[in-house]
Image: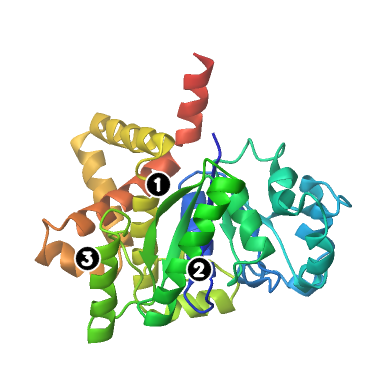
Amino acid sequence: MTKIVSFIIQKGGCGKTTTTVNTAGYLSLQGFKVLCVDMDPQGNMTQHFGYDSEMLDATILDLFNKKRTLDEVILHRDQNLHLLPNNLRTAGAESELQKRPDRDYLLRDSLLTGISSYDYVLIDCPPTLGLFSVNALATSGEFVLVVSPEFLPMKAIKPLYETFRTVKYQLNHTLQFNGIMMTMCDFRTRHSQEVLEILKRNFPQKLYHAFIRNNVSLKEAAAYGQTIFEYSPQSLGAFDYQNFAEEFIRDHHKNRSKRKYYQDTFDRLTKEEKHQILMIAKNNLSAYVRSNLEKIPGSKVIKESLRIERNKILENLFPYRIHAKLEQQQ
């Protein structure tokens, strides 16, 4: 089944769009089919993917107004990564949309029959708790809070959690709180450490172990209209987002199946073939990770990074989608 996830916090500048874009980018590289939904009329996600949001022929507003079909609005960035774009026209139409009796289900009803081919639908929410964020939550199976280690985003958690409870009770009984992920981290500062401790204390089971450090490559990738994996795949930003994305999908059945398939495939190879693949995987790691691979070879994070790179090579050599299709036919 398609997994629909909203990335949300009602404050700008917390890395929400960056997180949605790069999580989607990583998932698509792993062979998952992903639809990104830009629910922010500012169109930041649309721009991050390299599109001029003001020059689009059709946007999500045309879908809400039933002027275009889903297929007519979706942009195919590549084979596995598609985008439902947005721009400022949607903001201008918000007051009219608010008057509609189906206002809380505009997105849900628009996606209802057209997303079965996707593994994931990732929704980038605006930095407010208005109509468009409510629509995102009413459509999603779960949501992720994206928080930078500052006290203002921390204060945004309580009203957002109250909105979640209202939406769950009134609009979407299946909605679940997936977890909290931290971006723009610098744990050398006392302030960041204090915020981390508060989150650990209040959300011990909901805080992702992976976190995103400050990295200039992430900003540069956005400026070039690329994901971090396209712009600088060996950067710290790519390393951090691949760890988050792997943690994000680890409990997903299809991902567990993929990881088992890669491991079984690797185990069947000859000793020489295994050695060659591992050497290529090590060379694909960033210099930072390679050095730590030698210094702390027992580190779970470092070992996982090497396994991820190994699986990327195996995906190119023995595509999982072919294996999955053969299994379905049997």
Alpha carbon of mark 2 to alpha carbon of mark 1: how far?
21 Å
**Residue 16 at what x, y percent from top left?**
50, 68
Residue 226 occupies which quadrant of the picture? bottom right
- State yes or no: discs 3 and 1 in contact (Cβ < 8 Å): no
Is residue 22 among the parts visible in the rendering?
A: no
Residue at 52% from the left image edge and 44% from the top image edge: 141
- The dot on residue 51 is none
Amino acid, disc 1: Ile
Q: Which residue was labeled with disc 2?
A: 9
Q: How many marks?
A: 3
Is 169 positioned to the left or the right of 90 in the image? left
Residue at 74% from the left image edge and 46% from the top image edge: 110
Q: Secondary structure at mark 3?
A: helix
Residue at 34% from the left image edge and 72% from the top image edge: 236
Residue at 43% from the left image edge and 81% from the top image edge: 152
Alpha carbon of mark 3 to alpha carbon of mark 2: how far?
35 Å
Quarter of the image with the N terminus in it: top right
Q: Tell me the mark number nearer the camera, choosing from 3 and 1.
A: 1
Mark 3 / mark 2, whichever is N-terminal:
2
Amino acid, disc 2: Ile
Q: Nearer the viewer, residue 35 or 31?
A: 35
Mark 3 / mark 1, whichever is N-terminal:
1
**Residue 173 at what x, y percent from top left?**
54, 41
User: 120 above or below 245?
Assistant: above
Q: Secondary structure at mark 1?
A: helix
Q: Tell me the mark number nearer the camera, choosing from 3 and 2.
A: 2
**Residue 30 at what x, y percent from top left?**
45, 47
Q: Which residue was labeled with disc 3?
A: 290
- State yes or no: discs 2 and 1 in contact (Cβ < 8 Å): no
Q: Nearer the viewer, residue 29 or 277?
A: 29
- The dot on residue 249 is 1
Alpha carbon of mark 3 to alpha carbon of mark 1: how far?
25 Å
